[in-house]
Structures are given as C-alpha cells and as structure tokens.
Amino acid sequence: MSWIDKLTGGFKKTADRLGDNIGGLGTGAKAALDTATLDDIEEALIASDIGPEASKRIRNAIAARKFEQLDERGLRTILAEEMEAILAPVAKPLDIWGFPRPHVILVIGVNGSGKTTTIGKLGAWLKEQDYGVMLAAGDTFRAAAIEQLRIWGERIDAPVISGKEGGDAAGIVFDGVRQATETGIDCLIVDTAGRLQNKTHLMEELAKVRRVLGRLNPESPHDVILVLDATTGQNALNQIEVFRDLAGVTGLVMTKLDGTARGGMLVAAAEKYKLPIHAIGVGEGVQDLRPFDPRAVARAIAGLTQ
Ligand SMILES: Nc1nc2c(ncn2[C@@H]2O[C@H](COP(=O)(O)OP(=O)(O)OP(=O)(O)O)[C@@H](O)[C@H]2O)c(=O)[nH]1
C-alpha cells in the first residue's frame, strides 16, 4: 500500500467524524454562508478536535473569503486549504545537522505513547537516507523497555547501547556519545523514561542527561522530541504544555493516527503550540512513520481524496 493510501486510510475515521459534523451545512442544495452557518461550521470543527483557536481562525478565514454559497465539496476544499495554512508552518522534517557527530535526539513522552516504536521507525527512516544510527536505552526503569529497544535495534540493524534495569540513564547516554564518536555514527537516538507521575525525579534525570550531553558538546541534545498518542486527544495537548516546560521540547511526533477519529488534534496542536511537527505515525510497522506532509494531511482530515 502506498504511503498516501495509508495516510488517507488512517485518517478515515477523523474525516468521517468531520463529515458527520459538517453534514447538512453544505449538502445537497447550496447553502448560504450567513453568520449562523459560520457559527455552525466553527462548532463542527471544535467537535472534530480541531480546537477552539484553530476553529475560530478557520471560521474567520472562511468569512473573509465572502462566499455567498458553498456546497459540501466546496466546504471540504476550503477547510483543507485553511487547515493546510495552519499546518504548513510547523511541518519540519528532522534535519541531521549536528557537528561534530553524533547528532543527538532525545525522545521523551509518557509510557505507552509509542516512544520506543517511534525510535525504531525513525531510525529506519534515517538509515534509508544513509545516516549511521545508534540507539541508547535511557529508559532504565523497566527491563521490558530496554528489551523492546534491543529488538528494534536488531530489526533495523542499528547498535543499541544499554545498561541494567535501574541503572544511570546519563551514564548510558555518555557511553552512547563516546561509542558513536569512535565508530563514526551520525545520529544517536536516546529513549528516556516517561513517568509523569514523578515529575521531580523525571526533571532531575532529564537535567542530568542534558548536563552530561552539554559537557560533551554544548549544542547537544540537538533535538528533544515529544512523542504523543493522538488517540488521547486533549490529554495529548496537555502533555505538550507539561513537557515543553519540563524538558524544553523542540519538536513533536504524533503517533497512532491510524484508526483514531481524533486526527483533528494535529491542527489544534499546530495552532496552539506552534512547535515543529517532524513526523506522524500511522501504524506499528517499520515503514509507518514518515515526514509530516501538511497538504496531504489537511486533505485527508477534510475527507478529500488526494
Ligand atoms: N496503531 C498504531 N500503534 C502504534 C503506533 N505507534 C506505536 N504503536 C503501538 O503502541 C504501543 C505502545 O508503543 P511503545 O512504543 O511501546 O510505547 P512507549 O511509549 O515506548 O511505551 P513504554 O515502552 O511503555 O514506555 C505498542 O503496542 C505499539 O506497537 C502507531 O503509529 N499506530
């Protein structure tokens, strides 16, 4: 299946939900775009997880275009254009720019958000572009997390630096940078623990990892990527705020966009936080993470075929 088919399929429930919500606003006969209709469109967008800020912006943009009449297809097209305008400024593929190598990417997020799977998929994507990739198991709190990363390492043929359960994350990251430097690896991707329940400990651990990295290279970590589970909707949006303040997030990866009706939250996140969105995940397979294409995603959410 092509990526675009996968994307459209993944967003189908989101598009159906938006379709149900805007149904009747433009179906059949042409509907005049009066204030009441514009209010209904705004409400339909909010009910589709697009968020109050983005929904208002889209409403105002539609109002400014002074349509007298709009059928449903026309409405979907305009929604796609306006969502693309919100998404485009935040769509930024990951760039491996750090010199001296390795470029270090810290990956953070709550347990179960898809962090480890994303690291594996991201590693595969970078390897496809001929970058040398190494993984570091900085989530030392669960033996299962370390094992899961090792399995991904084998799968994508990337070395994995790990220690014992309960070990020192900063020590593993230090080893990772040393080995990556010695072996000429371009990119070190670091898994971290994501226990928001114990914020103080989490902060201390991340601060220590950052200190160690900073001593080796003041520009490191080059990226701090927050992985979010799109199926959790508003909860995922709240996590952006918490982790941004705790961990200095530099960009986002949104996962599990396949089979959720809440894909609209991408637009809400883009409008509210303006953080770069590097990639989206639409499945558990190694090929299921790709750079974020704002036009394709906006059209998929609006239920337009590509
Ligand atoms: N459908 C779908 N499932 C995904 C996606 N990304 C991850 N998953 C699944 O979500 C589950 C949790 O993913 P993990 O990668 O283990 O998440 P984690 O954040 O590392 O969680 P811990 O290992 O518990 O810290 C796994 O079953 C993954 O296969 C995605 O894009 N789509």
Image (spheres, grey):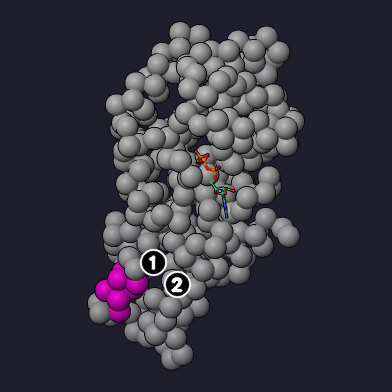
Q: Which residues are magenta?
A: 37-45
Residues under numbered marks 2 and 1 in contact, where contact means CB atoms less than 8 Å apart: yes
Q: In front: 260, or 91?
A: 260
Q: Predominant secondary structure in magenta?
A: helix
Q: In the figure, is residue 80 to the left or right of 273?
A: right
In this rendering, the answer to whether 215 lies above or below 242 is above
Helix, strand or loop for disc 2: helix
* Cα separation between marks 2 and 1: 7 Å
**Residue at 55% across, 20% down:** 164
Label 2 crowding class (10 Å Cα cut-off): few <14, some 14-19, many 20+?
many
Query: Picture quarter containing residue 158?
Result: top right
Question: Residue 286 appears at what percent x and percent y?
Answer: 68, 45
Residue 216 appearing in the image: yes
Quick check: is 42 in the magenta stretch? yes
Residue 46 sits inside the magenta stretch: no
Q: Which residue is mark 1?
A: 48
Quadrant placement of the C terminus: bottom right
Of the 4 image quadrants, the one containing the N terminus is bottom right
